[in-house]
Amino acid sequence: MKAAPTHACSVGITDRQKILRIAKPWLERLVKRAVAAEGIEQAEIGILLVDDRRIAKLHAEWFDDPTPTDVITFDLSAGDVLAGDIAVSTETARRMAREVGWAPRQELAYYVVHGILHLTGYDDRAAADRRAMRARERAVMKAIGLPVPPRTPSRRKRS
């Protein structure tokens, strides 16, 4: 009898913002479900919730772009363990949620899924890659029981 695969996903959450109240257990479940939806058996994911000022500082430091962005992913993977840190602007999530017509928490979930997909190898720089990533974002959101992101031409490029 073949043993069932073990899924070990540790999630660390650091909240450095006062824009949105985010329940850490909800966010941890979200990360674990998204990782499982991607078929990842071992993962160590850090989530950093920040405001636009703090994410702009990270964006400047790591990408030489001093503007705020929605999500920045740092791939720290080694061997068979998916590992990385995902910085998310809750301020951008709140603003974009109003623009596209859904809840800020849903927009934040979308950014987290986007970051996890970057860790698994998806890229969104070229148009074809971006289309593939957007399709996978929608599939993962649906698989984990969240609404599919609204489509709008105003979606910003992510790092």
Image: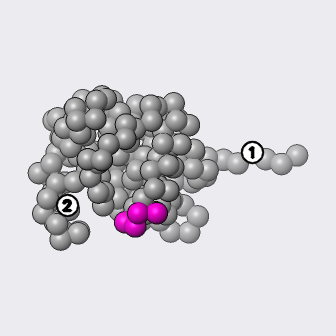
Point out residue 140 in the picture as x, y percentages from the top left corner: 52, 43
- The residue sitting at 61% across, 46% down in the picture is 7
Label 1 sits on what residue type? Ala
Which circle, 1 or 2, is nearer the viewer?
A: 2
Instruction: Please tell me whether the stretch drawn in magenta is mainly helix, strand or loop.
Output: helix
Q: Which numbered circle lies on residue 108?
A: none
Residue extending farthest right? 1
Number of marks drawn: 2
Q: Position of residue 49 (x, y in %)?
A: 26, 44
Residue 8 lies left or right of residue 60; in this view the side is right
Magenta stretch?
125-129
**55 and 41: which one is in front?**
55
Q: Quadrant of residue 59?
A: bottom left
For residue 105: magenta?
Answer: no
Taking the image as drawn, is residue 77 in sight?
yes
Residue 124 is situated, as x and y percent measured from the top left of the image, at: 40, 61
Q: Residue at x 22, y 54 (%)?
A: 69
Question: Observer-nearest residue: 42 or 99?
Answer: 99
Given residues 139 and 31, the one toward you in this image is 139
Residue with the mark numbered 1? 4
Secondary structure at badge 1 equals: loop
Marks 1/2: CA–CA distance: 40 Å
Q: Are marks 1 and 2 in contact (CB under 8 Å)?
A: no
Residue 30's image quarter?
A: top left
Check disc 2 and report the residue beneath it: 58
Figure quadrant of the C terminus:
bottom left
Residue 99 as seen in the image, left or right of residue 85 = left
Apparent side of residue 132 relative to residue 53 in the rendered image (left or right): right
